[in-house]
Image (cartoon, rainbow, N blue to C red):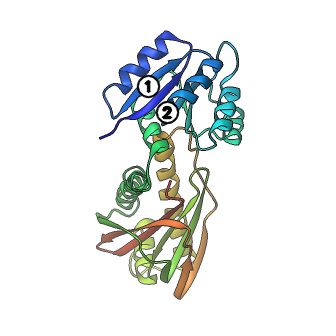
Amino acid sequence: MEKIRVLVVDDSRMSHAMMDGIISRTNFEICDYAKTSAEAIEKYKILSPDVVTMDMNLPDADGLECSQRILELNPHAKIVMVSAMRDANLMIQGRAIGISAFVQKPLNENELLDTLRMVCQSNEDSLKILEESYVKTFIKVLHKNLFSLAGVHSDMSYELSTEGKLEIDGIAIIIGFTGKPIGRAIVHTDIDTMNQFARAILGRSADEILSDEEANECMEETANIIAGRSVSMINDIFKDKELRITPPGIIVGKKLSIVNPKLTTFNIVASTELGDLKMNIGFAGGE
């Protein structure tokens, strides 16, 4: 496999050694180091690296200014800001310039490598990352919380959706994702299964009254918990994503179609003794 070439821009020898120790054991390779902004720009012109790691504080300029000059040379340049600082204002400025991602010092090996892979990913790699770090996180949380909330075991399965629309027959809870990547989750099932889950979660027996409003609210809160916990886990994996969920919306009906062809979507099914609970999750751009 061809190595992915990294230009490390940092004036710290310790940072050089740490970066080399992490990267040397992977399919990345450091093609050179630059200790100043001027040196970084010249080496970028000569070497055309696949990705640049950029320190925020350089002797002759800050990392934002250096990144901007590199992006003027190549608007498609991939730059990962590596800095002890990681405040919201810095990230907003960096995103506006075109910086791809942010990693905070001291370096965490898994975080750095996951971020570099994400930035350098091809479409095929992007899909794999969605499956491994996003879809499987939702599956893990869904499986765990169906047991903790309803006391039921579930057999989990998932597949990439090839349909341009989602057919709903029963109830659907829609929760949006903001941040990067944007997207949404739709938790849906038929009315009978919803009632079964609601009774299990609320501790209602079969002969106790359960109103439609109670059942709907129970399913809505369950979906909100699953989405919230999944997003929190993803944020722990990708420190610069800062995904957030929007307030849930609920629709009930038969033969409903939800269309969103711009999303890369996956269908998750949790098969339980109470019925199948389904989740469709999608992300824009396959990122």
Q: Is residue 83 visible?
A: no
Which residue was labeled with disc 2?
Answer: 49
Q: Nearer the viewer, residue 12 or 149?
A: 12
Query: How far apart, in angstroms, are the residues tagged by discs 2 and 1?
Result: 7 Å
Quarter holding the N terminus is top left
Q: Nearer the viewer, residue 221 or 90?
A: 90
> Looking at this rendering, what residue extends furthest in the top direction?
13
How far across and down, in percent of the image, does residue 191 sit?
Answer: 46, 83
Name the residue rendered at 46%, 37% in the picture: 116
How far across and down, in percent of the image, does residue 192 sit?
Answer: 42, 83
Instruction: Assess whether mark 1 and mark 2 are in contact (beta carbons under 8 angstroms).
Output: yes
Relative vertical location of residue 127 with respect to residue 8 in this rendering, above or below? below
Q: Secondary structure at mark 1?
A: strand
Q: Residues within 10 Å of mark 1 (few under 14, many from 20)?
A: some
Which residue was labeled with disc 1?
Answer: 31
- Amino acid type of the residue tagged 2 in the rendering: Pro
The image quadrant that residue 55 belongs to is top right
Q: Residues within 10 Å of mark 2 (few under 14, many from 20)?
A: some
Name the residue rendered at 69%, 14% in the picture: 60
